[in-house]
Image (tube, rainbow, N blue to C red):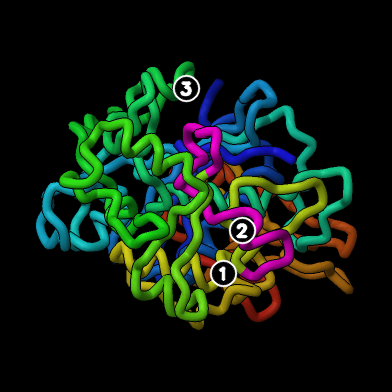
Amino acid sequence: MKRFLLLSGYSLLILNIHAQSVFQMQTVNGTPAFDAVANYCGQKWGEYLNSSIPIKVRVYFANLFGQTLGITIPNGRRDFPNAPVDSVWYPSALANALAGTELNPGEDDINIFIDNTANWYMGLDGNTPSNKYDLVSVMMHEIAHGLGFLALSDINNGEGSFGYVEPSDIAPLVLSFPFPEQEGKYAIYSTFIENFSGQELDDTTIFPNPSIELATQFTSNQLYFNGPNAVVANNNQRVRLYAPATFAFGSSLHHLNESTYPPGNPNSMMTPFIGLGETEHEPGPVALGILQDLGWSVNLDASINNPSKSPWMIFPNPAKEYVYIYAQSTLKSPCTWLLVNVSGTVCMQGTIQPSTELFAISLKDLVSGIYFIKIDNIALKILITN
C-alpha cells in the first residue's frame, strides 16, 4: 500500500476546451503518456465543476524517494470579494470561481508532484495490472486535494494546529507560487470537521489553536465532516475522516476513513491509500458533496465516462512545434485526419492506423493561428503559436 500526501524543463500545456470548467494542465518532465493522463483527468474534473475562471494546474513528474505516490499543494486566498466566510482560507481555484475573477494572475492554482519511480499504469481504460499503480486514480485524487480537500492541520511539540503549515514542512519541494502565509487561519474544509460528540474543531473556546486538545482530537480516530451536502450523499450520516492514533502529516484529516470506504466502495477514491491494481477513477458522491459544501458549483450528473464527448484528444493546446492526437478507444480501422485553417484550406493530412494509440504531427512549417484537426466527423480546435 502506498500513501497519498497532501500538501528539468517544462513540457506541455494542455487545455481542455470541452468541459464546464477549463483545466490548464502544465506538466514538468512528463512523457507523452503521462501528459495524456494529466489532460484526461483535467477533462474529467472539468465536467464536474462550474467555473468561469480557468484552473491552472502544474504537475511535476519527480522523484519523491518512494515515500508517497503523490503530493499536492494548492495556492490559496482569503477575504476576497464574494467570499462566503471571512478570515478562512480557500484554494485559489475555488476563490477565483466564487469571486468571478482571477485573484492570482500569473500564478498556478495547484502544484502536484507525482513520483517518477513508482511502477505506473498510464492507460486510461482502468484495466490496471495487478503489479502497477493506476496513474489516473492517483491524479484524480491529487487534483481533488487542490480543489479543497485540505485541512492545514499539523502537530508540533504535542500541540495540534490549523493554519500553521510552513514551507519547511514540504521541503525539499519548491512551489511555482509563493507559499501562502496562513497566520493560524482555518481552511474552509476544516470548518466542517467535528468530533464524535459533535464539537466543532474550529471552536477555539473548546479547542484553542494550537493546543494539546487539538492534538488529542487529531489522533482520536473519531473525526467527521459534517457538511449538509456531504451528509446527504453519505446516506444522511456524517462522513468519517482519516484520523489515526499516529498523526500522519498531510494525510490525517485530509482523507476519508479507509476502513469506512474500502476499495470498491463508490467513495474510496479519497481515502489515504491505494493498492497495486486498484482503480478509482470517479470521485464518488461523498467527495462531490464535500466540494459542494466548500462552495463549488458541482454537476452531479456530469458525463464522466467520456469527458471530452469525443473519441479523440489533442495536446498540447496551444501547440508550438508538434501536437499529439490520442485515441481514447481502440481503432477498428484506419482513420484519415486533416489539419485545416480557419478558411477551410487543408494544410496537412494523413492516416492513423488501428495499431496507433498516440500520433504526433509536426507543426514547424505552419504560421501562428487557429486551426482545426478533423477526424471522421469530429473537429478539434487548436491554437498554434509558432
Span highlighted in magenta in the image: 244-266
Callouts 2 and 1 close, C-beta under 8 Å: yes
* Element marked by disc 3: loop
Would you name the residue on which mark 2 appears? 269
The circle on residue 173 is 3
For the residues labelled 2 and 1, the Cα–Cα distance comes to 7 Å
- Helix, strand or loop: magenta stretch: loop
Circle 3: residue type: Leu
Residue closest to the eye, 320 or 93: 93
Does residue 151 sit above or below 311 in this rendering?
above
Q: Tell me which numbered mark, 2 or 1, is placed earlier along the sequence.
A: 2
Q: Position of residue 262 (x, y in %)?
A: 69, 60
Q: Please tell me which residue lies in front, 69 or 101.
A: 69
Q: Is residue 340 left or right of residue 22?
A: right
Q: Nearer the viewer, mark 1 or mark 3?
A: 1
Which marked residue is nearer to the observer: mark 2 or mark 3?
2
